Image (tube, rainbow, N blue to C red):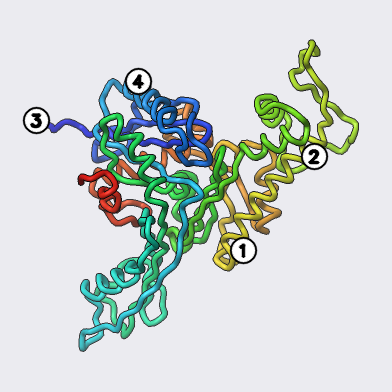
């Protein structure tokens, strides 16, 4: 008699919407059986600022997803974003102890522990330890160095950490629904694994997830994540720029952005006008199309430039042969790939969901939730999580709640 399947939830508490997916863990493949969505309230730039409002809309999305799935969730994997997240690289090296210079598990464990041992400031906790490739006597080893011969073993970790209270706010939203948060998943890595291929990650690729209130990015090298980051800027900033520049309400500005916004100015006729509603009724107003494009293009360029600046020397065209892949709801802005190609000096394309994803979830705005569910399925099946995250990192936050 077969055991009961595990039903896993992927939750993304975003600035513009809350997304919940339900996946069935069969041990063989990933199957999405439920979906729920709710307009976001109480969340600004990826951070919860109104607990009651955020909880209500998140719980509504969970209920919708469970209703469609016809099952109750067993656990949740929770996407993490927000400008409070920061990262740093720390490296360690050990001399191989064996007389024959054969690297063993003790050498590997020691060098990894040393590389992850850097202390954090008070009030901050590790969200993810991302291991970079090992090096044996300076030579990059993409897999385990166990049983290789060498005198020195090096490894580095990109450690992502965040404000404990910000993370606790997200956890409390889910715990209020009497659900266990099994793991935290970086939004940048979740969407990155959905829209890139293994060979692209091997050759070097930069994934930029343009959301409503934040922009997450992940740079891949040697098949795995190298550097990640978050900007407190996204599609909402384009809307706000239009509202200020054209003296509109946020709703009116968002309507213009969705209909006429572009990441690269295309209109050449300076006198060409477009209408707010297109009904020519009372209250409808004309606007210069080129002005709309100039405003949205300027902000799009600025966001991508800031990403490039934050990457610093980690990014170069030579080590990013697969170029830039754009995802997230704001990636639907026309011309965004062309803009990214100019900013980074490499090829750029829009990310696409895998072929098995249903048509109603293929929109770029769902890529993060799909990636979180993917990681949850792999985590529950006992395989190593794609990001290389150590299991149990969530234990860092248990003291915030007074119980394990």
Image check: 11 left or right of 43? left
- At x 57%, y 43%, the residue is 210
In the rendered structure, are the residues bearing label 2 and label 3 in contact, judged by CB atoms less than 8 Å apart?
A: no
In space, the residues marked 3 and 4 are separated at their CA atoms by: 26 Å
The residue indicated by pointer 4 is 68
Question: Which x, y percent locates residue 74?
Answer: 24, 33
Q: Secondary structure at mark 3?
A: loop
Question: Which x, y percent locates residue 385?
Answer: 32, 51
Q: Which mark is residue 266?
A: 2
Q: Which mark is residue 378?
A: none
The residue indicated by pointer 3 is 1
Task: Classify residue 36 by image quadrant.
Answer: top left
Question: Which x, y percent locates residue 113?
Answer: 28, 69
* Disc number lying in front (3 or 4): 4
Q: Secondary structure at mark 2?
A: loop
In space, the residues marked 1 and 2 are separated at their CA atoms by: 26 Å
Q: Which mark is residue 317?
A: 1
In space, the residues marked 4 and 2 are separated at their CA atoms by: 43 Å
- At x 53%, y 36%, the residue is 364
Of pointers 1 and 2, the one earlier in the residue sequence: 2
- At x 40%, y 61%, the residue is 159
In the rendered structure, are the residues bearing label 1 and label 3 in contact, judged by CB atoms less than 8 Å apart?
A: no
| Callout 3 crowding tier (Cα within 10 Å): few <14, some 14–19, many ≥20 | few
* Disc number lying in front (1 or 3): 1
* Disc number lying in front (1 or 4): 4
Of pointers 1 and 3, the one earlier in the residue sequence: 3
């Amino acid at each position: 008699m077969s055991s009961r399947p595990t039903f896993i939830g992927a939750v993304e508490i975003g600035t513009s919407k809350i997304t919940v997916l339900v996946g069935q863990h069969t041990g063989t493949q990933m199957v999405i059986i439920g979906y729920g969505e709710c307009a976001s309230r109480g969340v600004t730039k990826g951070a919860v600022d109104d607990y009651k409002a955020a909880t209500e809309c998140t719980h509504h999305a969970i209920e919708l997803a469970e209703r469609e799935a016809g099952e109750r969730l067993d656990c949740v994997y929770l996407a993490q974003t927000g400008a409070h997240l920061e990262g740093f690289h720390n490296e360690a090296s050990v001399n191989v102890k064996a007389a024959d210079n054969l690297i063993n598990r003790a050498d590997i464990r020691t060098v990894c522990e040393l590389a992850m041992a850097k202390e954090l400031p008070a009030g901050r906790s590790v969200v993810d330890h991302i291991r970079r490739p090992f090096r044996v006597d300076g030579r990059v080893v993409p897999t385990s160095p166990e049983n290789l011969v060498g005198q020195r073993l090096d490894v580095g970790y990109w450690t992502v950490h965040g404000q404990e209270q910000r993370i606790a706010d997200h956890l409390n939203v889910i715990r209020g629904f009497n659900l266990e948060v099994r793991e935290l998943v970086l939004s940048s890595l979740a969407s990155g694994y959905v829209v890139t291929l293994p060979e692209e990650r091997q050759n070097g690729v930069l994934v930029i997830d343009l959301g409503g209130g934040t922009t997450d990015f992940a740079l891949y090298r040697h098949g795995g994540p190298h550097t990640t980051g978050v900007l407190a800027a996204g599609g909402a900033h384009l809307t706000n720029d239009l509202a200020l520049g054209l003296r509109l309400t946020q709703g009116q500005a968002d309507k213009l952005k969705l209909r006429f916004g572009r990441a690269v100015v295309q209109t050449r006729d300076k006198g060409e006008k477009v209408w707010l509603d297109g009904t020519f009724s009372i209250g409808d107003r004309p606007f210069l199309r080129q002005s709309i494009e100039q405003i949205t293009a300027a902000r799009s360029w600025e966001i991508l430039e800031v990403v490039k600046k934050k990457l610093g020397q980690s990014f170069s065209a030579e080590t990013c042969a697969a170029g830039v892949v754009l995802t997230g709801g704001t990636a639907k802005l026309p011309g965004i790939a062309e803009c990214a190609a100019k900013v980074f000096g490499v090829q750029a394309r829009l990310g696409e969901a895998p072929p098995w994803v249903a048509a109603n979830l293929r929109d770029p705005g769902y890529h993060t939730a799909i990636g979180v569910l993917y990681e949850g399925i792999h985590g529950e099946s006992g395989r190593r999580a794609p990001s290389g995250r150590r299991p149990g990192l969530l234990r860092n936050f248990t003291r915030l709640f007074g119980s394990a």
